Every structure is written in structure tokens, then in C-alpha cells.
Amino acid sequence: MFGFLIGDPMLGNGSSKKLGILLTFSILVFLLGYYLITFLILSFLAFIIQFFRDPQRKTPTSDDIIVAAADGRILSGKIDKIEVIDSSHPLLDKITEDDEAVLVSTFMSPFDVHVNRAPITGKIIHSSYYQGKFKIAKGKILTENEKNLIVIEGKYGRVGIIQIAGFVARRIIQYVNVGETVKIGTRIGMIRFGSRVDLVIPKDCEILVDVGSKPKAGETIIAKFPRKE
């Protein structure tokens, strides 16, 4: 039943082996008649499976759109901030040469899919990791929490993806490297048991979502670039 998960590269070899051991142990205790312990172990395994799920997505193909990089659909998961940022933002100068940009922030509940996807087609031109704390992914966490920045340059401009760890999250994973070209909607990373993803996009884009919207990574259109003749 769990064969698709054991050996999943998203878990890593160590985690996969631990899950295999837990599954084997649960079968053993079930055969010995310890049904409550079996139930607790299988409940834990079910939580891990739902967290690491990675469903296929139908990504729009237009070259002037920006799609969601993260899911925010279950319970408190949602887009909870859309605002114009300026040079006071600590990472803006790593993303764009403009003085201002728009930030669209998605909070992911522990029950959301935590695989992050490329918001546009383009080349990875910058990536940087920042150590930090693991506070709840609300409030002033950008300057305090662990985070990872990926910048993609596409046909119509640059987009920054900031993966931010939270209270439960303890590891940010990046699948792509500087110099690689990615296609819109492809997997670029994940946050294990976490928490928030900020999209930083050009100020002249047309925003197509609102605070409270429930985005689906790789599918929901967040914004459109102005077409340049």
C-alpha cells in the first residue's frame, strides 16, 4: 500500500527507510494483537503520506502569465497578503533593479501540498539560502525565519520565489540550480512541514487574485505581464 512512498526521492533515503521500518513494525504489532498501537502507527504514516503527496497539475500554457508557486487551499491556507514593496524589503535588490514590486504571499497549512512550482518559464539567474529561526509563519518572519530565494528571468520579466520555513517546517528543499531553464508549473522545491511562499513580481503586472484566494500551485493564475510590443 505504501510502496509508492517508500523510496520516494522527496523523502530522502533515510526517511524512506524509517517509514519502511515503521510499516513493518506496525504489521508485526498487529499480528501480536496490539491493535491500538497499530492504529497509532498507521495514523502517523497516513499523515506523512498526505503531507508528501505530489498530485499532477494542469498548467496553463500562455507565456504572459504568472501561476501560483504554492498551494494554499486547506483550512487556513490561502493568499493572505498582497502589497507593494520597496527597497526596504531585504531581498528586493536580489530580484529586480526596480525600486518597487508586488508581493503576493501564500500561507500553506500543514495539510496543503507542499511542493513548490515554477511560476513562469525562464532561466534560474539567482538562488540564495538564509539561515534563521522557525517561528510561526505569520507576522514579521521574513527577516527572522529560515528562507530560500529563487529568481527566474522569463520573456517578460523576473519573478522571485521566497520559500519561508515556519514553526513546524525544519527543512527547505530546492530542486533547481542557477543556470537551469525551467518550464512554468514544473517542480522547483518544497518546504517540509511548512509554511509560506512569497512571490515577488513586477509592479506593472495585472493581479488576478485577491486576499483570501485559495491558489493551487502550477494552476492558479496569479497575474499577467503587460505585453511588450
Image (cartoon, helix red, strand yellow):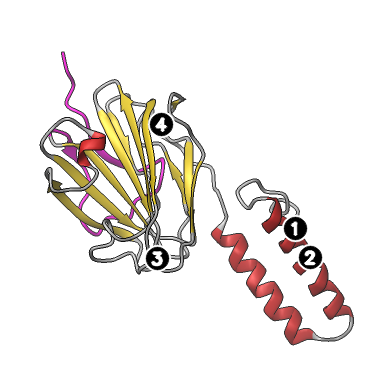
Q: Which residue, as the protein is rendered here, is positioned at the far top?
A: 229
Q: Residue 118's image quarter?
A: top left
In whole angstroms, how far apart are the C-alphas of marks 4 and 2?
37 Å
Q: Earlier in the sequence, mark 3 or mark 4?
A: 3
* Position of 207 relative to 105 (above/below): above
Q: Dot 4, crowdedness within 10 Å: few (<14), some or many (≥20)? A: many
Which of the two labelled residues, at mark 4 and mark 1, occupies the earlier sequence position?
1
The residue labelled by disc 1 is 17
**What kind of element bears circle 2?**
helix
Q: Is 212 within the magenta?
A: yes
Contact check, label 4 and label 1, Cβ < 8 Å = no
- Where does the N terminus fall, quadrant-wise? bottom right
Secondary element at tag 4: loop
Quick check: marks 4 and 2 in contact, CB under 8 Å? no
Please tell me which residue is depicted at 39% across the width and 65% down the height of the picture.
134
**Residue 225: x and y, percent?**
21, 29
Judge left or right: residue 78 versus residue 25.
left
Residue 184: mark in rendering: 4
Q: Going from the N terminus, do you reach mark 1 or mark 3 first?
A: 1
